[in-house]
Image (spheres, grey):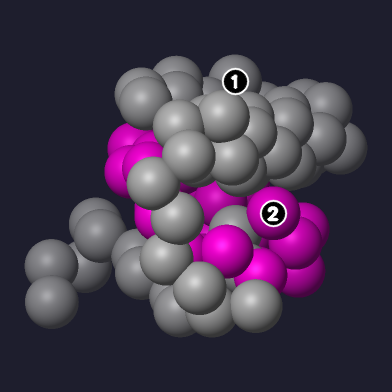
Amino acid sequence: MDERLFYVRGDATNEETLLNANLPKANWVIIFADQITENNFATRDPLLVDGKTLLIATAITSVEARFDKKIHVTV
């Protein structure tokens, strides 16, 4: 895999997962909508999918503040 690409399987709303993905060194992040819920059920409810995406973006913002780093987020 390209040395500039970091991918870690896990809960992207969890700060530890984001740190394992080397987020503090990132300049940008792409968030893909995930239709799998916490209980491993697929959902077609756009509000749940959008809500999870928002939680991921919020977790990224938390890491930005902690490390005083600007990260461009694309959804």
Apparent side of residue 53 relative to residue 17 in the rendered image (left or right): left
Indicate whether 20 appears above or below 12: below
**Residue drawn where x is 36% and y is 69% of the image:** 7
Indicate whether 68 appears above or below 5: above
Give coordinates of residue 58: x percent, y percent. Answer: 73, 31
Q: 33 and 61: which one is in front?
A: 33
Quarter location, residue 40: bottom right
Q: Can residue 28 be seen in this view?
A: no
Tell me the quarter of the image containing the N terminus: bottom left
Label 1 Cα crowd, 10 Å radius (few <14 / some 14-19 / many 20+): some
**Residue drawn where x is 44% and y is 21% of the image:** 72
Say which element carries label 2.
Answer: loop
Q: 3 and 19: which one is in front?
A: 19
Give coordinates of residue 5: x percent, y percent. Answer: 25, 60
The stretch drawn in magenta includes residue 29: yes
Apparent side of residue 3 relative to residue 27 in the rendered image (left or right): left
Q: 69 and 43: which one is in front?
A: 43
Which of the numbered marks, if any, corresponds to residue 13?
A: 2
Apparent side of residue 27 relative to residue 59 in the rendered image (left or right): left
Quarter location, residue 8: bottom left
User: Amino acid under label 1?
Assistant: Lys
Which of the numbered marks, if any, corresponds to residue 70?
A: 1
Tell me the quarter of the image containing the C terminus: top left
Among numbered discs 2 and 1, the one appearing first in the sequence:
2
